[in-house]
Image (spheres, rainbow, N blue to C red):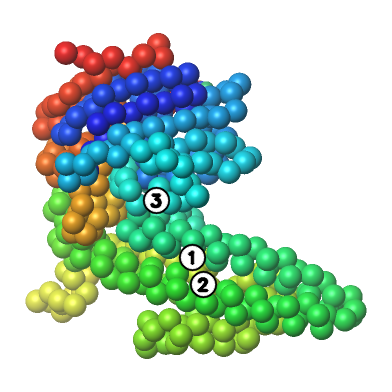
Amino acid sequence: MYVSHLTLHDFRSYASADVALEPGVTAFIGRNGQGKTNLVEAIDYLSRLSSHRVASDAPLVRAGTEQAIVRAAVVKDGRTAILEVELNPGRSNRARINRSPLPRARELLGLVRTVVFSPEDLTLVKGDPSDRRKFLDDLLVLRTPRLAGVRSDYDRVLRQRNSLLKTAGQARRGSSSQESALSTLGVWDAHLARTGAELLAERIELVEQLRPYVGKAYETVARGASRDDAEIAYRSSFELPATLDRSALTDALLAELERRRNDELDRGISLVGPHRDELVLTLGHGPGESAPSDSGETGLRLPVKGYASHGESWSFALALRLASYDLLRADGDDPILILDDVFAELDTERRAQLAELVAGAEQVLVTAAVAGDVPEALAGTRFLVGNGEVRRDD
Ligand SMILES: Nc1ncnc2c1ncn2[C@@H]1O[C@H](COP(=O)(O)OP(=O)(O)OP(=O)(O)O)[C@@H](O)[C@H]1O
């Protein structure tokens, strides 16, 4: 898949922009703050309906205006579709395909698939568990757009349940009747368990599928590493049943909610469920755990967060993105790769390795402040970005 045309109106720094693109590698070069990332962010927005840089839509709309439009012609299997999204912060966004309005913007999900590498990726490794959960959930939605609904239902139920727990907890401490709050809580428990079980099962399956790709990608980007060095594992906030069957998971989650009821009322928050889970990243050092060396010595396996060096952390973050790319590719569709300002962060060897790995993708969009930062393997079409203009450098 590739984007053959991008049009922006009042998106970030652009009053308007119109860029014709081709498959293969395209680099956007320009000094800092000229609007290179804004261009690729717009394409990524069509893929996920959110930005890799900010949590809300408001900063994406040009200051002083109320609405931004991102439109792209997307070519897949030789057929072109025009996708458009209208960003209306504070109101619902609207989307169109080939100029026909969609009932909900969410229906655009899955039509463009992007994988973005950016300096922010280090938070995948060094950030909070919520950053890693988001990584998993974003990938889930890219592969199975229907899960966007499950994810937002879960978040909504969680918010409602938390506010009810607070009310019921306060009633208990003030010894007023908490009967009605507790009976309503039972209803929210059932919702939380049902949507939570679905999200949980999908995440666990995803981690299993992603695992081999992460090991392989880490071996490629980290000097001297072996395939078993980088490991990912899903850690649930409660003991999982032996099967991922949705009803068994729902029952297990419900039973755990029952067991933790008093703790939850004391603290006024939901303590069990996918929102408390963690994607655990570990690195093996020396002989693998399963293969003791001749001296009987086994290798160390340590969490990445808090232990890994800066270079190892970067390699792990790159491996997570590359693994996502490989997995999406294995689904049968080459996602658009976006390398936003990453080369300046990497040493020469990692730059060359990353460039080699991605050079064959159907479309690669690169941003860099200086042309010299873009490895030779990624020589392709160049655009110069500056003074609000995007100009092809022929
Ligand atoms: N909503 C907005 N309205 C107007 N201008 C904005 C808005 N959001 C961002 N900008 C401007 O866009 C510019 C940043 O653009 P962008 O992040 O694309 O830079 P860049 O060329 O990728 O730079 P760098 O090389 O530093 O990453 C900044 O000057 C910022 O002030």
Q: Position of residue 366 (x, y in %)?
A: 26, 31
Q: CA distance from mark 3 to mark 1?
A: 14 Å
Secondary element type, mark 3: loop
Rendered-image quarter of ligand 1: top left
The residue closer to the viewer here, 293 or 183, is 183
Residue 195 image label = 2
Residue 109 image label = 3
- Residue that label 1 marks: 150
Left or right: residue 21 versus residue 249 is left
Q: Answer whether residue 214 is visible to the viewer in this image.
A: yes
Residue positioned 42% across, 40% down in the render = 100
Q: Is disc 2's CB within 8 Å of ligand 1?
A: no
Disc 2 or 1, which lies upstream in sequence? Answer: 1
Amino acid on which the number 3 mark rests in the picture: Leu
Q: Is disc 1's CB within 8 Å of ligand 1?
A: no
The image shows residue 222, relative to residue 150, as above or below, that is above
Residue positioned 45% across, 69% down in the render = 199
Q: CA distance from mark 2 to mark 3?
A: 20 Å
Amino acid on which the number 1 mark rests in the picture: Val
Contact? badges 2 and 1 (CB < 8 Å): yes
Amino acid on which the number 2 mark rests in the picture: Thr
The residue closer to the viewer here, 25 or 208, is 25
Contact? badges 2 and 3 (CB < 8 Å): no
The residue closer to the viewer here, 390 or 121, is 390
Q: CA distance from mark 2 to mark 1?
A: 6 Å
Disc 2 or 3, which lies upstream in sequence? Answer: 3
Category of crowding for the residue at label 1, using alpha-carbon neighbours closer than 10 angstroms: few (below 14), some (14–19), many (at least 20): some
How many numbered markers are drawn? 3
Left or right: residue 180 versus residue 114 is right
Picture quadrant of residue 364: top left
Secondary element type, mark 2: helix
